[in-house]
Image: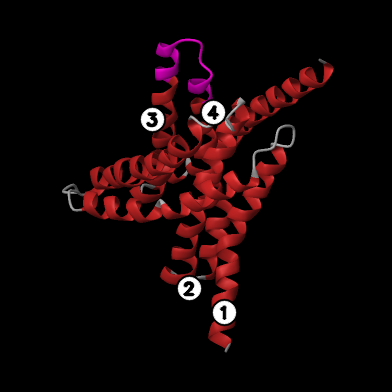
Amino acid sequence: MKGEFNNLNLFITAVTPGIALGLIIYWFDRHDREPIRMLLKVFILGIISVIPTVIVENLLMNFNIFGGILGAGYTAFIVAGLVEEYMKRQVVIKQVYYNPVFNEKLDGIVYCVMSALGFATIENIMYVVFRFPDVESIGLYRALLSVPAHMLFAITMGYYLSLSKFASTPEESNYFYKKSLTVPVILHGIFDFILMSGIELLMLLFIPFVIYLWVTNLKKLNMYYNDSKNSQNEYHEE
């Protein structure tokens, strides 16, 4: 009985950050809210995307012939950064990018965040409930850093995906479409590489880097929030 209660507590600890951040993003989208059904669909598909991600990551790890810093770089940028960001982005591309519900720039951020939080939530369950159930600090660490990091990478992804969708020329659209993957991959890779490298000097840069992620991505979120607000005000004035 005690073990079951402890597992329930761990499960609640694991899912709370993703749900909380998802509700915050939903609140931000209050001027032209997205259909809850579509938001849940993207969130669930973000969860499901963990399956092909794990398969591909395990396959790529077999090719990690490097040691030390190179091995950490390969794992951080290719295995984790590229594969995870690609899979989370594919959910949005397949389900939303060409869908009429994607009708303003803020939507790109909202849907990318929902996909990422679905992914991050199941990943959190894997770590908190199954891999490190006896390490109490894991839940706190991941709630404060890992899950929010997935959200921040997704804000960057959605920012560029929206620039791509609403670009004025095909060339411009293609440029931002590529950046919607490459920039989150680089940010994700840097985040993981600092933690995996074991280099103390790099660890000194970790908190400044996290602060940078928050500052720059909140600016992006606020920019599109204001666009949404102004668009709705203009609509009602007409």
Q: Are marks 1 and 3 in contact (CB under 8 Å)?
A: no
Question: What is the secondary structure assignment of the residue under circle 1?
Answer: helix
The disc at residue 133 is 2
For the residues labelled 4 and 3, the Cα–Cα distance comes to 13 Å
Q: Amino acid at mark 2?
A: Pro
**Residue drawn where x is 40% and y is 46% of the image:** 192
Q: Is residue 25 above or below residue 158?
A: below
Quote the CA–CA distance across marks 2 and 4. Answer: 36 Å
Mark closer to the chain start, 1 or 3: 1
Three-letter amino acid code of the residue under disc 1: Asn
Q: Residue at x 59, y 66 (%)?
A: 13
Report which residue position mark 1 lands on.
6
Q: Magenta part of the protein: which range?
A: 162-175
What colouring style does the render use?
Answer: secondary structure
Image coordinates for residue 127, horizontal then vertical, percent: 45, 64
> Residue 52's x, y, as percent?
33, 52
Precedes in sequence: disc 2 or disc 1: 1
Residue type (three-letter) at the residue carrying disc 4:
Tyr
Of callouts 3 and 2, the N-terminal one: 2
* Nearer to us in this view, 159 or 134: 159
Please check the rendered image and state whether residue 228 is part of the magenta-colored stretch, yes or no.
Answer: no
At label 3, the amino acid type is: Thr
Residue at point 28% right, 55% down?
55
As for residue 173 lying within the magenta part, the answer is yes
Label 2 sits on a secondary structure element that is: loop
- Farthest bottom residue in view: 1
How much space separates mark 3 and mark 2, taking CA atoms?
A: 34 Å
In the drawing, does residue 29 fall left or right of residue 139? right
Q: Could you tell whether 174 is left or right of 69 in the image?
A: right
Residue 159 - label? 4
Labels 2 and 1 touching (C-beta < 8 A): yes
Please identify, in this view, whether the residue under mark 1 or under mark 4 is nearer the observer: 4
